[in-house]
Image (cartoon, rainbow, N blue to C red):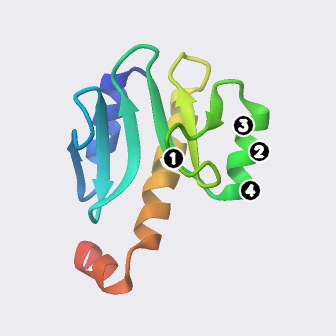
Amino acid sequence: MNVEDIRAFCISLKHTTEGFPFNETTLVFKVGNKIYALLNLEKPHSINLKCNPKQALELREEFDSVTPGYHMNKKHWNTVLIDGSIKPGVLKEWILQSYNLTISSLPKYKQKELYN
């Protein structure tokens, strides 16, 4: 996947918003006003994704292109280098997991507002 494909997938997820709150090279995707992905638009391209702590460690051990989240809580976030080593379906699955983890962390009333 390239950055355009990743952006298209992220904005296809229900209630996703995008913006540049930090700088013009980091595209941020949110749901319920909470970040679930940060896409680095400069080379080397990468994406930061939320992950459950156990799986985050497992992915770092299994994939050379997965490292602790850059500028993020390293327990809950991974940075994935967009170098073609991760299959598109796998990357989409990780993005969806990050999206779902973020939704589950929202207050129940906010989840109901978004999904009822």
Quarter location, residue 84: top right
Is 47 situated above or below 104? above
In depth, the one of 55 and 21 nearer the eye is: 21
In space, the residues marked 3 and 1 are separated at their CA atoms by: 15 Å
Q: Are marks 2 and 1 in contact (CB under 8 Å)?
A: no
In space, the residues marked 2 and 1 are separated at their CA atoms by: 18 Å
Q: Is residue 13 visible?
A: no
First-in-chain label (2 vs 1): 2
Q: Are marks 4 and 2 in contact (CB under 8 Å)?
A: yes
Q: Which residue is mark 2?
A: 58
Left or right: where does residue 93 sit relative to residue 23? right
The picture places residue 88, in percent across and down from the top left corner, at: 51, 29
Q: Are marks 2 and 3 in contact (CB under 8 Å)?
A: yes
Q: Quadrant of the N terminus?
A: top left
The picture places residue 44, in percent across and down from the top left corner, at: 46, 15
Quarter location, residue 15: bottom left
Q: Quadrant of the C terminus?
A: bottom left
Q: Are marks 4 and 3 in contact (CB under 8 Å)?
A: no
Q: Residues within 10 Å of mark 3 (few under 14, many from 20)?
A: some
